[in-house]
Image (cartoon, rainbow, N blue to C red):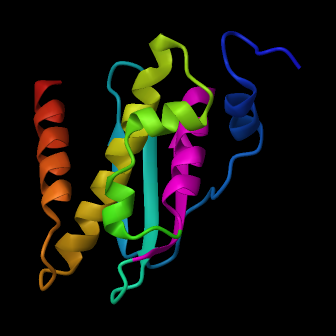
Amino acid sequence: MQPTLGYSEQVLEHFRNPQNTGELEDPDGTGEVGNPVCGDMMRITLKVDDESEIIQDIKFKTFGCGAAIASSSVLTELVKGKTIREALQITNQDVVDELGGLPSIKVHCSVLAEQAIVAALRDYYDQHPEKEIPPELAKKAQTREETEAQH
């Protein structure tokens, strides 16, 4: 099948058959982000093993375009089973690469996906004040908050 409207086959597959959809009951962390310009909204819920800090399960709900849904889907696949520190190494460019590229006008969807996992992990640490926040999470969370303040 030929790519449609500049979307790769991977984007179309994740849009048509998204993975890890829904919402976890009693999640260990929840992240909700949105883009006021395009109206896309992403909500990520996750379960984390407190000792190993492995992300055991992750689900998403996304209101938005096909690229936003595909970005959410692929993000959940990239972080599931990883430690928090490994998940924090995943960037929006990793999401774009895994999707086989995104049209430049849709790259913001991959940024939202990265912001959503950061928000969910930040929430996890907010619920566990006895745990030390990894420096890379603190930095990414601060960057996300500064970006939101500009809008």
Asked whether residue 64 appears in the rendered view, the answer is: no
Front position in the image: 34 or 52:
52
Asked whether residue 121 appears in the rendered view, the answer is: yes
Q: Position of residue 1 (x, y in %)?
A: 89, 20
Q: Residue at image x 69%, y 22%?
A: 8
Front position in the image: 121 or 38:
121
141 displayed left or right of 88: left
Quadrant of the frame with the C terminus: top left
Quarter residue 87 falls in:
bottom left
Q: Position of residue 127 (x, y in %)?
A: 22, 77
Q: Residue at image x 77%, y 37%?
A: 16
What residue span does the magenta drawing correspond to? 54-80
62 part of magenta stretch? yes
Q: Position of residue 34 (x, y in %)?
A: 35, 36
Q: Residue at image x 75%, y 27%?
A: 9
Picture layout, residue 13 above or below residue 1: below
Q: Position of residue 13 (x, y in %)?
A: 76, 36
